[in-house]
Image: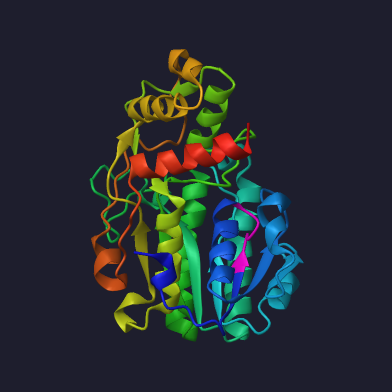
């Protein structure tokens, strides 16, 4: 689906929490291109100012530097808002294992603050970033929304609690909510640096520097890697749907195919070698498996296709080509 063909009323005022982050900044950019008024709330704990620098001169864009752990900041950001895309969170399973208290404060208490602020501001719909980590120890493939297991990390617990709170707010207060369970999103603006960098940008940067990336485990773990434009499409569809059965529920956001880490590194070397032939000779190393990691992840996207008209255009090959091109241009 062409994102430009999703009918977004240019009169909408949309709040994107975590709008300076990887996913949030891509959403802000697309929403502005569609003529909407956008407010970005971010405390820059993980978001990057450079992600939104090109947007600051747009008269329809407002940056509020604040923290979702502050109810006052949440209330201030919701003034006059029609829809909320709640992307603000502390991601990463290892981060949550190392510091479960901060992950809980941001992901649970901050989430609850945003729900309260949205309810009180009479926002039309609260669309939030859920997570495939909610499937926990369930070994069933593909992952179907109604069948989850027990969480395997503090991060997974926080994201499941988000779904429970959203459900209660829809039933108790009539706030429309839609949860989007993201599956390993990648693409432009994703940060390759830091201890908790996602695997694709981290490996890309290491390959470009002729350094050997380290795979956790034997490389057989697989993921449903999902290009950013598929995620943007899903958020827009969640805004515009007027189908009653499509709201107050959760959806998988993925492509619906899985790729193991050995295959992923092979593809990355292939596409990066088109820019630098020496990368083809960079070896891959292997380390111990990471605590809290789910061995395999594959989404069913039938529910999103049926109820929202979701039609992802970017498979792993197409998405990686786009991502690699962006990284080579912007991060060398």
In screen coordinates, is 212 left or right of 178? right
Q: Quadrant of the C terminus?
A: top right
Residue in the image at 34% along x and 31% along y? 221
Residue in the image at 63% along x and 41% along y? 99
In screen coordinates, is 165 left or right of 102? left
Q: How is the image coloured?
A: rainbow
Q: Nearer the viewer, residue 190 or 58?
A: 58
Q: How many marks?
A: 0
Magenta highlight range? 16-21
Type of secondary structure dominating the magenta stretch? loop
Q: Quadrant of the N terminus?
A: bottom left
Up the image or down, 327 lies above or below 128; here it is above
Q: Position of residue 242 (x, y in %)?
A: 36, 83
Q: Position of residue 83 (x, y in %)?
A: 54, 77
Asked if one can make out residue 324 in the rendered structure from this viewpoint, the answer is yes
Asked if one can make out residue 160 in the rendered structure from this viewpoint, the answer is no
Up the image or down, 133 lies above or below 53; here it is above
The question of residue 275 being in magenta is answered with no
Residue in the image at 49% along x and 46% along y? 187
Q: Nearer the viewer, residue 296 or 137?
A: 296
Residue in the image at 56% along x and 38% along y? 327
Up the image or down, 48 lies above or below 70; here it is above
User: For residue 15, what is the image quadrant?
Assistant: bottom right
User: For residue 5, what is the image quadrant?
Assistant: bottom left
Q: Nearer the viewer, residue 185 or 117?
A: 185
Q: Position of residue 120 (x, y in %)?
A: 62, 84
Q: Position of residue 92 (x, y in %)?
A: 54, 43
The question of residue 17 being in magenta is answered with yes
């Amino acid at each position: 689906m062409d994102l430009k063909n999703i009918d977004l009323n240019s009169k909408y005022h949309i709040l994107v929490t975590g709008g300076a982050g990887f996913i949030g900044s891509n959403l802000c950019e697309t929403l502005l291109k569609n003529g909407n008024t956008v407010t970005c709330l971010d405390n820059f704990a993980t978001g990057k100012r450079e992600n939104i620098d090109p947007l600051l001169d747009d008269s329809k864009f407002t940056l509020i530097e604040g923290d979702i752990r502050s109810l006052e900041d949440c209330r201030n950001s919701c003034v006059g808002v029609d829809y909320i895309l709640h992307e603000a969170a502390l991601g990463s399973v290892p981060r949550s294992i190392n510091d479960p208290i901060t992950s809980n404060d941001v992901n649970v208490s901050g989430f609850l603050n945003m729900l309260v602020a949205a309810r009180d501001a009479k926002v039309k719909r609260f669309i939030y970033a859920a997570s495939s980590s909610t499937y926990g120890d369930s070994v069933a493939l593909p992952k179907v929304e109604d069948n989850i297991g027990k969480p395997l990390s503090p991060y997974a617990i926080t994201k499941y609690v988000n779904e429970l709170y959203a459900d209660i707010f829809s039933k108790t207060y009539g706030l429309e909510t839609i949860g989007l369970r993201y599956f390993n999103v990648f693409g432009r603006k994703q940060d390759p640096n830091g201890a908790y960098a996602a695997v694709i940008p981290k490996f890309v940067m290491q390959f470009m520097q002729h350094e050997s990336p380290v795979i956790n485990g034997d490389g057989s773990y697989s993921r449903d890697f999902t290009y950013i434009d598929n995620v943007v499409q899903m958020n827009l569809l969640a805004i515009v749907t007027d189908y009653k059965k499509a709201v107050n529920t959760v959806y998988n956001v993925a492509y619906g195919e899985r790729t193991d880490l050995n295959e992923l590194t092979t593809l990355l070397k292939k596409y990066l070698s088109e820019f630098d032939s020496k990368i083809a000779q960079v070896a891959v190393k292997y380390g111990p498996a990471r605590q809290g990691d789910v061995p395999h992840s594959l989404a069913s996207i039938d529910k999103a296709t049926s109820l929202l008209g979701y039609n992802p255009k970017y498979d792993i090959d197409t998405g990686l080509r786009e991502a690699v091109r962006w990284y080579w241009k912007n991060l060398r």
